[in-house]
Image (cartoon, rainbow, N blue to C red):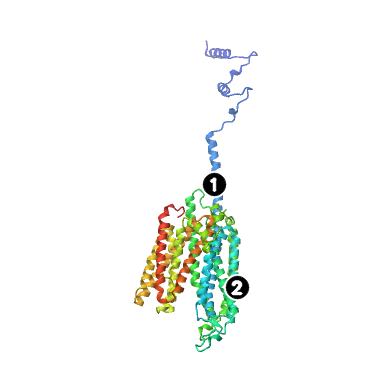
Amino acid sequence: MSKGESNQDDQESSVRSRPQNNDGTASESDQPSHQDTTEQSRPQNDDGTPSESDQPFRDEDSDDLESQEREGLLKSDDTIQNADKIWRGEEQINQARKLLYLSHMFDQFSEGTWQFCIILFLAAFSNYESLVLVSTYGLCSGLLVCYFGPQLGRFIDGADRLFTARLFIGLQSSAVLLATTCCYMLLAANEKPFHFSDESEDDSNNNSSYGVPTDAKSIFLLVGVHLLGAIAQVLDSGFTVAIERDWIVVMSQYITFAPEEESTNLQKQKEWLSETNVALKQIDLSCQIIAPAVAGFVVAGWDGGGENHKASDLKSAALFVGCLCAVALVVEYICSTKIFYAVQTLAIKPIPSANNSSPQDTSCGLFGLSRGMKIFMSQEVSWAGISLSLLYSNVLTFGAIMTAYLVWRGISLEQIGIWRGVSAAVGLAGTFVYKILSARIGLVNSGMLSVTVQFCCLSIGYASLFVDNLTISFAMLIVGVCSSRIGLWVFDISVTQLMQLNVADDVRGEVGGVQSSLNSFFFLLSFGLGILLPDPASFHVYASIGYIFVAAAVVCFAVGVYSKRDSLAKA
């Protein structure tokens, strides 16, 4: 058989072996083998249709990858949006802080000018023959601040923030304007008698007692000056509490720096508060230096030109103070409004807790401190506030009492003025020290170190009181007092920020009001000692009392705060 015949027989055999239908066509099973395999492997429903698993094939890994890409894009969008929101928030809060600085500068400058000029006005009313009006004014102002501090703080906690700020600004400025009007009327009415009377002259014809006018009109105006000036100081104290103890804290919480990291948020808040507190304190100290100097030039510019310096025309100075107060009113009003609307969270007031509004605690008690002191002492950092208030009893400063003592010791007014400026400049440098110190060792450690340094520096000044050699004594006193200002202001800012971070939201105002009352109380204590012991030779007595209070401040902070620093949530 040939090869071709053999192939043909094989093909015929293959055809006969294939299954066929009745019409002779090949059966379905006679399809290509790979299709037959696929058809058999496909799962089918009861009606013969392909099941859901027979849908177009998709790789599960590919689905996961696409899902992750979509989530990544969404997260990227959220990150961009959050970053943009944070940037806009930072820009808003920085603009608001600049407005805060501007408002604070006008407030402190006008207040410093007023406090300097009112002393000159009161001395002029007595024909420069008595300090009784200056003393009564200081006593009246201090008592009112001491009494109304907690009530104003409670009002701050419960009232709308913008309404509170506008109310304090408006009433304070109105009180100063009315007080300057009374001063102008008094100065105009007593302008001619501004001269020394001869000893032989009959005092009964002067219608005055120790140089103080005693006619009905003058007494009425003097009472008005005392009350209006004291009210202005109370309202200024309340406004300071509202801004420094409440507004600033809310502003520091406005930006969400890192939502996923609470520790980072707290650190950022501390840095923001530190920068703001330092800047505000620098404005305070600068205004304390510049405002009296400017006011002095203004008064000198309107001097009557007579040989007797008591012939100064202070009426124009009173008008200047009134105009300056009016300008400050407009600036503070506008800035406060812009800040409030720029920082939206200022419109949200915390709900007072039941513990702080119970009916049995509504009585004010002595100086209004009964209810307020309970709340104040319940705070973790209450002893820090007490330590700060104790420092107000210290008379080893270039205040009125030590100035009078130095004059009595024979130190010239020029020297006193120069060293007073140096002391203020050193205190200003202390604000820069605080910023560095707090960033490295923390708030509590900064407070402990600074109050200790202040005590050590004051020890040098205190020891000088018992040195007979005038030159050595004066040198020791200057070194001790000037260097102590660094510790004082570092401690002041440290305590302020500790209370900003650790006082409950719904009692910030009341705690700040009690703090102002305590500060005024211990200041009045030193003032009262000066009245009881007016002889400059007794200066070492109330200097010793003030020195003891500074030592007590060190102990209170060490025991009440420093020993518990690890338990403070935001130290």
Locate the C terminus and report the quarter of the image it occupies. bottom left
Q: Position of residue 353 (x, y in %)?
A: 55, 52
Q: Nearer the viewer, mark 1 or mark 2?
A: 2
On residue 178, which mark appears?
A: 2
Label 1 secondary element: helix
Q: Name the foreground residue: 172 vs 214.
A: 214
Q: Quadrant of residue 428?
A: bottom left
| Mark earlier in primary sequence (1, 2) | 1
Q: Position of residue 487 (x, y in %)?
A: 41, 65
Residue type at mark 2?
Leu
Residue on which disc 1 sits: 76
Q: Position of residue 106 (x, y in %)?
A: 55, 68
Q: Position of residue 569 (x, y in %)?
A: 46, 52
Up/down of 18 relative to 330, above or below: above
Q: Residue furthest right?
A: 23
On residue 153, which mark appears?
A: none
Label 2 secondary element: helix
Q: Name the foreground residue: 168 vs 205.
A: 205
